[in-house]
């Protein structure tokens, strides 16, 4: 078949990433119903949330080689197939460890999908069209998260049907990609520098990777433990899911364009830091008794600009020759953070017995993000890098 218009391909990628966001958030959305029947405690729930990202730690570096060897279309298909099979296995799991196995398989598929989507967008878009295209791709993930929080709690005690629905949406994404994205072998080309970075790139790259990990872990912990927090405060499971979904919907207005607006103002790092500080303040306000809808809309809205700003930093600390290897390192740190930090938040919940403990953990991750952001600002002080920031 003839290749589709690049914007149509982007919409298909977006649909696939919606299925990924919904599957990722399925465990958090159904969390209060899973504790007991499927997971032993909230540490187990956090481990199940984090397991979705654990395989990405292993796959991030070889994913670049897989893409160069087999092509974007084939790796997209493989990722969605693994997401479907892992999701089906989890829906049928009789206990925690079998659910963990299914979660790891589907998480491995999501890692392949994430990296393949990023590469395809970078290949198909350039110049002024790159930022809005990347924004569209990034926006699909929180849409899936919001849909999971809104719809999956409606299954109630039939939580296995909710997990099955998430797997079937991944299957629909697989069919969409199989229809619209050709499974072409990559053309022979000179290989990028393998396994090496230029002098001076390691420290900024590791700092940006740690920042991306802590920022996303804070967002994931809020989404994963917020329904249980709201249920403990007296909400029904369905009502808690609907209120929690406001975080996913609220991020959408500023996620595609917020970073570009901050860049235009000329102080992107300052804007990023102010947004993350305000996110922490919104969580503290929620814990202090502020109206949950207002606090969560504020948290979600402010979470938008830092996402594109941090990803833009990645492009600035890596040369073109180092990008393939450097992006692998970046995503390895991202997946490592998402695998390790949510279980820590669950451990805080079990240790203290307080439903608010994971939210305070998320505040701590945001404060660490601010420290890392300040470190990046210090590392980018040389005039030539500041010029690139302008």
Image (cartoon, helix red, strand yellow):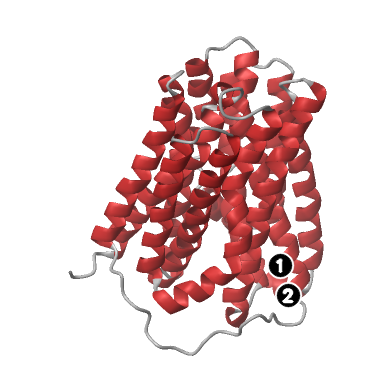
| Mark carried by residue 190 | none
Q: Residue furthest front?
A: 94
Q: Nearer the viewer, residue 298 or 186?
A: 186
- Count of numbered badges drawn on the protein: 2
Residue identifier under label 1 = 205
* Residue at 56 percent of width and 24 percent of height: 37
Left or right of 238 on screen, residue 345? right
Label 2, residues with CA under 10 Å away: few <14, some 14-19, many ≥20: some
The vertical placement of 166 against 201, above or below, is: above
Which residue in the structure is indicated by mark 2? 201
The picture quadrant where one finds residue 47 is top right
Residue at 44% across, 88% down: 189
Residue 230 location, quadrant: top right
Q: Residue 157: horizontal and vertical position, in percent? A: 46, 18
The C terminus - image quarter = bottom right
Above or below, comparing residue 196 to residue 174 in the picture? below
Which SS class for mark 1? helix
Can see residue 380?
A: no
Q: Which residue: 49% across, 53% down? A: 110
Q: Position of residue 300 (x, y in %)?
A: 57, 35
- The answer to whether residue 171 shows anywhere in this view is yes
Q: Residue furthest top?
A: 234
Q: Residue 240 at x, y = what percent?
A: 54, 19
Image position, residue 8 (x, y; %): 28, 58
Near mark 1 (Cα within 10 A), the count class, few <14, some 14-19 or many ≥20, is many
SS class, disc 2: loop
CB-based contact (under 8 Å), mark 1 and mark 2: yes
Q: 266 above or below 238?
A: below
Instruction: Give how far apart the Cα atoms at labels 1 and 2 are.
Output: 6 Å
Left/right placement of residue 30 relative to residue 230 reads: left
Determine whether 176 is above or below 205 in the image.
Answer: above
Quadrant into which the N terminus falls: bottom left
């Amino acid at each position: 078949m003839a290749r589709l218009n690049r914007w149509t391909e982007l919409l298909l990628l977006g649909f696939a990433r919606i299925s990924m966001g919904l599957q990722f958030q399925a465990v958090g959305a159904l969390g209060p119903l899973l504790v007991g029947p499927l997971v032993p405690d909230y540490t187990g729930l956090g481990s199940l949330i984090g397991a979705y990202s654990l395989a990405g730690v292993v796959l991030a570096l070889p994913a670049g080689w897989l893409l160069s060897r087999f092509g974007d279309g084939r790796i997209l298909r493989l990722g969605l197939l693994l997401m479907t099979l892992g999701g089906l296995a989890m829906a049928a799991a009789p206990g925690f460890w079998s659910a963990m196995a299914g979660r790891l398989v589907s998480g491995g598929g999501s890692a392949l999908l994430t990296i393949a989507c990023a590469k395809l967008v970078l290949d198909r878009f350039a110049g002024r069209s790159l930022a809005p295209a990347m924004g569209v791709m990034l926006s699909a993930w929180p849409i899936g998260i919001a849909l999971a929080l809104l719809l999956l709690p409606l299954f109630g005690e039939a939580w296995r049907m909710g997990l099955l629905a998430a797997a079937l949406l991944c299957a629909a994404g697989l069919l969409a990609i199989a229809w619209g994205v050709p499974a072409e072998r990559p053309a022979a080309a000179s290989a990028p520098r393998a396994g090496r970075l230029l002098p001076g790139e390691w420290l900024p790259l590791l700092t940006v990777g740690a920042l991306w990990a802590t920022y996303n872990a804070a967002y994931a912990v809020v989404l994963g433990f917020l329904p249980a927090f709201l249920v403990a405060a007296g909400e029904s499971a369905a009502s808690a899911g609907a209120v929690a979904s406001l975080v996913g919907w609220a991020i959408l207005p500023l996620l595609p364009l917020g970073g570009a607006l901050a860049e235009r103002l000329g102080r992107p790092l300052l804007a990023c830091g102010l947004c993350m500080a305000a996110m922490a303040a919104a969580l503290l306000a929620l814990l202090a008794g502020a109206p949950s809808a207002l606090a969560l809309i504020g948290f979600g809205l402010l979470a938008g600009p830092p996402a594109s700003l941090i990803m833009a930093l990645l492009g600035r600390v890596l040369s073109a020759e180092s990008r393939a290897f450097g992006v692998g390192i970046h995503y390895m740190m991202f997946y490592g953070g998402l695998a390790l930090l949510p279980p820590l938040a669950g451990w805080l919940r079990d240790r203290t017995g307080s439903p608010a403990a994971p939210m305070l953990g998320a505040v701590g991750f945001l404060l660490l993000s601010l420290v890392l952001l300040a470190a990046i600002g210090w590392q980018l002080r040389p005039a030539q890098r500041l010029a690139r920031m302008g």
